[in-house]
Image (spheres, helix red, strand yellow):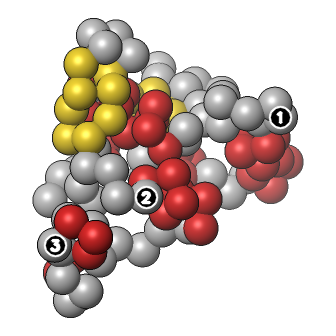
Amino acid sequence: MPQSLGGSDTPDNLALACHRCNERHYNFTVGSDPQTQKQFPLFNPRQQQWSEHFIWTKDGIKILGTTPTGRATCNRLDLNDEHGDEPSIQIARIFGYKLVGIHPSLMRDPRET
Ligand SMILES: [Zn+2]
């Protein structure tokens, strides 16, 4: 719960996030699922498991929501950097996955088979 909506600043209400995600999350608590055009709660890393809502594409470049919450979160936070002109997040993932071999789907996160 964002502080602007009455949430506290105690550790149990905080989540570590990069500047980009924090900015896009803003004080939204719901997002639009592109599949149904309905609003769903955004993923809560304090209460939910990443692997139950998201999967990496086989090439490790995109994150796909596998549930309404996952899709709404991908859309709201633009996790695949598809809302702008240059998909720099995808370029960074290509670099990490193919060139450096450091990528969440190579360590722990589920990936398309
Ligand atoms: Zn981020």
Q: Position of residue 96 (x, y in %)?
A: 75, 51
Quarter of the image where one finds residue 82: top right
Residue topped by disc 2: 26
What amino acid type is highlighted by mark number 2?
Answer: Tyr
Q: Which quadrant would residue 74 be assigned to in this image?
A: top left
Q: Amino acid at mark 1?
A: Glu
**Crowding near pointer 2: few (<14 within 10 Å), some, many (20+)?**
few
* Quarter-of-image position of residue 69: top left
Gap in Å between the C-alphas at discs 2 and 1? 22 Å
Residue that appears at 35% across and 58% down: 27
Return the mark for residue 51: none
Label 3 with label 2: CB-CB less than 8 Å:
no
Disc 3 marks which amino acid? Gly
Which label was assigned to residue 6? Answer: 3
The residue closer to the viewer here, 69 or 109, is 69
Tell me the number on the disc at residue 86: 1
Q: Secondary structure at mark 1?
A: loop
Quarter of the picture containing the N terminus is bottom left
Relative to 39, say whether 30 is above or below: below
